[in-house]
Each structure stands twice: as C-alpha cells, then as structure tokens.
Image (spheres, rainbow, N blue to C red):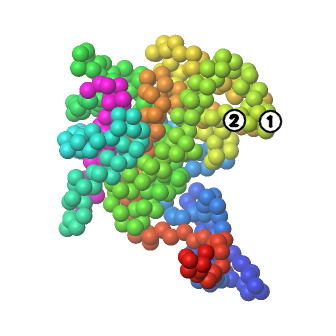
C-alpha cells in the first residue's frame, strides 16, 4: 500500500500520495492540491518543487554525486568522448560501435550551415554579444528546415543531428568576426572537437595542428557541462517545449536563459573578477581577507562554492586536472592566471574556506581553461552552451515522449483589489 501524506486545512484533512525515485528521493504528489483544497503552494524559485519525472540525470548535492543515465561523471569524463555522452543522454544508452559510427557520420555530414544564414549573421553589429547571436540563429534554424512542422514522419532525429552538427559552426562565427578574421568552414575529416578547434583557431595563412592535450581538456569540459538536472536553462527548454514549440525554438530559449550571470555567465564573472584584482595590484591576500569580511567589504569571490553542491562539486575535481594539464602544456605566462592559482591555494587550504566548503567550482576552472586557450570572456557562455546542448535535447525529447502537459505555474496575487475605472478627464 502506497504511503500518503496528510494535510489539514480549515479543519478538513486531505490525503496526498508520496513517491520515491530510483535513487530514493522522496516527494509528495500534490498534483491535485488546488482541486481538492483551493490552495496552491508558494515555492520561490521552485527550490522544493519537482516539476517532472526524469530518467536522465541524477544529482545529489549533499553527497557530491552527478550521474548521467546511471553512469558516474567521473567514469564518463575519464573514458568517454563527448559525442558518446551526447548519445547516452539523448537515447538512454551508450552506443555500440555501429550506432556510434552512424551517429558520428550523420553529424559530420550536417556541419555546414546554409549560406543564407550568413546573411542574417552579417546583419548583427560587429560587437553583438555572441550569446545573442547564437540564440537568434538557432531559433532561425526552424525557418530553414520547414520539414519540422506538419511532417507525416518523425523527423526528430534529423533535427537533433542538425543541432549537434551546426551549433559549433555557428558559435565560431562570432569569435572569428570579433577578431576580424575570415570564417572557417568545417572539415568533415576531423572529429567533433578537433573540428571545432580548427574552426576557432586556424588561419588561411598557416597550418593549424590540434593539440591533443587541448582537445582532451575541451572534451572533458563539454562532458562536465552536458547536463545538470532541472536547472534554469533546462527547465526553460522543457517549459517552452511543453507548448509544443519546435526543438529549435526551445533550445534557443535555453540559450537565452543560460546567458544570465547567475547561470552560464558565472565563468565569465570569474575572469572579470581576476582582471579587477590584477588592475588593483594583484594582491591575492588582500582579496582573500576582503572575502572573509564580506559583510563589511561587500566583496565576494566568484567561482567558489555552489548552490546545489553542499559538500563539493564533483566536476571541479575532474576539471582541475584538465586545467593543470592545459596550463602546463601551453606554458602560459599570464598574471591573471597566477592570481587564479593564488586564490585556489587559499580556498583549498585556508580554514575559513575549507570549513564553509567554499571550494573552487567548475566555473572557476572552466574560466581558467578558456582564458589559457585564448578564448575571450564573451565567448565563455557560448562554450557552455555547446556542452549543454545534448542535455537540453535529451530533456526536450523526454518531455515530448512523456506527453507532459503544458507548463503553467500558479502565483499568489498581491496587487490591487477591484477598483472602479475613472475616465481620463477626471483623473
């Protein structure tokens, strides 16, 4: 017999079923709360509200656990390619060799972007933020692929392939334009990440060779960002998709949500903070002391601690090694990155940070890697979006397959009560 929760309101008792997930997360099912009681719940930011059932990602913030489809993030980051993880998230299982070959080949064949989309791109100001450009062009893809609407056959897989194949190409456009460089076309003889790096960094005047250490670091970084349960951008993708909006519109909405500094823009804030410290003389100890006295100084360190992970961010442990490998391999001599190392040292060993579990998080290390690679700060969130794309697709696909109803949150109205209209001449 299923357990129930009893709620007493205005002297009447109501029963609501409880449920438990496969990892023993417990919940009250209040789907019929308003119908039965006339009440709704107030849960600002939905911190305690489960809006869906999902089989994609499990996250335990207290224990520092992150799993994709039951596989630990540690195993996937160490043993898988980004495209393998993308397949896992979207289709539920790791691909066989034959499945992966078909998947990878399909992506290679769709990396080229319609030249008419270049005309849209050329209409943006040169200094347009790359996230605004990316969101707009991904949304525009729905106009370029009209078979999305009204097709008698299911073309979902085709659109999934197009998104995975073309978004890296679109992302590099803003970067190259910002440098005043010609845009590079994709090379389908290259693997997914080397192809992206080639489009980003190659020049017509010289050969470009992909550094395997850089490629591996980026592979790990994209895997770590691939999904993260029902965060702001993922919830946005599902909510927009619940109206039966097409996949391009839904992903575009997710990109816009990711853009915010409280979400995907956090790694950009890390580098901007480090730049500010450098401009002020680079005294790390001064800013560590300021962070300890935040109530007085108003200063806080970006890239330390996490809203969900109360112990440690499992992704940070993995990405720290990737950051160390990249800095060692490239031999980067950058005072900003030296400041980052100083802050990292303080956070890992100073009792103030250790006791409060304010460890460097994935945003801290990802910002360091992007900086070392020469990627400008306004492109950091674009890199995040490329990594998060498989998760958004998987969540959109799951939402459709579960035939979830259109999302429609409630509110507690706090405005004026009924007022009599006064004609304008009497106001």
Q: Nearer the viewer, residue 208 or 22?
A: 208
Q: Nearer the viewer, residue 290 or 371?
A: 290
Q: Kindly identify which numbered label has been placed on residue 300.
A: 2
**Which quadrant holds residue 100?**
top left
Quadrant containing the N terminus in the rendered view: bottom right
Q: Is residue 63 left or right of residue 362?
A: right
- Asked if one can make out residue 24 in the rendered structure from this viewpoint, the answer is no
Residues shaded magenta: 154-182
Disc 1 to disc 2: CB gap under 8 Å: no
- Asked if one can make out residue 120 in the rendered structure from this viewpoint, the answer is yes
Rendered residue at 43%/23% (across/down): 374
Badge 2 element: loop
How crowded pointer 1 is (Cα within 10 Å; few <14, some 14-19, many 20+) is rated as few
Rendered residue at 27%/48% (across/down): 162
**Which quadrant holds residue 351?**
top right
Q: Is residue 171 magenta?
A: yes
- Residue 207 screen position, x and y as percent: 25, 16
Rendered residue at 45%/49% (across/down): 256
- Residue 150 screen position, x and y as percent: 22, 67
**Which quadrant holds residue 42?**
bottom right
Q: Kindly identify which numbered label has been placed on residue 80.
A: none
- Residue 212 screen position, x and y as percent: 37, 22
Q: Is residue 43 above or below residue 320?
A: below
Rendered residue at 67%/47% (across/down): 62
How crowded pointer 2 is (Cα within 10 Å; few <14, some 14-19, many 20+) is rated as some
- Residue 418 screen position, x and y as percent: 63, 81
Disc tally is 2
Q: Is residue 326 above or below residue 126?
A: above
**Residue for badge 1:** 296
Q: Is residue 407 above or below residue 294?
A: below
- Looking at this rendering, what residue extends furthest in the front direction? 425
């Amino acid at each position: 017999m299923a357990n129930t929760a009893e709620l007493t309101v205005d002297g009447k008792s109501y029963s609501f079923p409880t449920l438990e997930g496969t990892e023993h997360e417990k919940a009250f099912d209040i789907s019929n709360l308003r119908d039965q009681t006339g009440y709704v719940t107030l849960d600002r930011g939905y911190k305690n509200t489960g809006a869906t059932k999902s089989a994609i990602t499990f996250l335990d913030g207290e224990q520092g656990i992150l799993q994709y489809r039951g596989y630990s993030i540690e195993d996937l980051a160490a043993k898988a390619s980004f495209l393998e993880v993308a397949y896992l998230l979207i289709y539920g299982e790791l691909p066989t060799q034959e499945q992966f070959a078909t998947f990878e080949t399909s992506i290679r064949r769709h990396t080229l972007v319609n030249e008419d989309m270049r005309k849209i791109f050329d209409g943006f100001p040169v200094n347009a933020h790359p996230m605004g450009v990316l969101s707009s062009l991904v949304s525009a893809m729905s106009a370029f692929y009209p078979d999305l609407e009204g097709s008698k056959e299911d073309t979902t897989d085709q659109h999934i392939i197009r998104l995975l194949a073309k978004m890296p190409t679109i992302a590099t456009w803003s970067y190259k334009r910002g440098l005043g460089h010609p845009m590079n076309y994709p090379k389908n003889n290259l693997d997914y990440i080397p192809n992206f790096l080639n489009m980003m960094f190659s020049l017509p005047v010289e050969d470009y060779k992909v550094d395997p250490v850089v490629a591996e670091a980026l592979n790990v970084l994209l895997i770590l960002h691939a999904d993260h349960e029902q965060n702001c951008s993922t919830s946005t993708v599902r909510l927009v998709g619940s109206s039966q909006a097409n996949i391009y519109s839904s992903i575009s909405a997710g990109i816009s949500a990711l853009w915010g500094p409280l979400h995907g823009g956090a790694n950009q804030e890390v580098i901007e903070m480090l730049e500010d410290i450098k401009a002020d003389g680079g005294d790390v100890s001064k800013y560590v002391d300021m962070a300890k006295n935040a109530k007085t100084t108003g200063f806080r360190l970006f890239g330390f601690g996490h809203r969900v992970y109360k112990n440690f961010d499992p992704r940070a442990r993995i990405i720290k090694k990737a950051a160390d490998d990249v800095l060692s391999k490239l031999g980067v001599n950058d005072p900003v990155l030296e400041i980052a190392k100083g802050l990292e040292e303080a956070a890992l060993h100073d009792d103030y940070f250790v006791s409060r579990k304010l460890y460097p998080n994935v945003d801290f290390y990802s910002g360091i890697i992007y900086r070392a690679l020469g990627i400008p700060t306004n492109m950091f969130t674009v890199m995040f979006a490329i990594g998060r794309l498989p998760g958004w697709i998987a969540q959109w696909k799951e939402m459709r397959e579960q035939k979830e109803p259109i999302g429609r949150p409630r509110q507690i109205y706090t405005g004026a009560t009924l007022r009599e209209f006064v004609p304008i001449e009497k106001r």
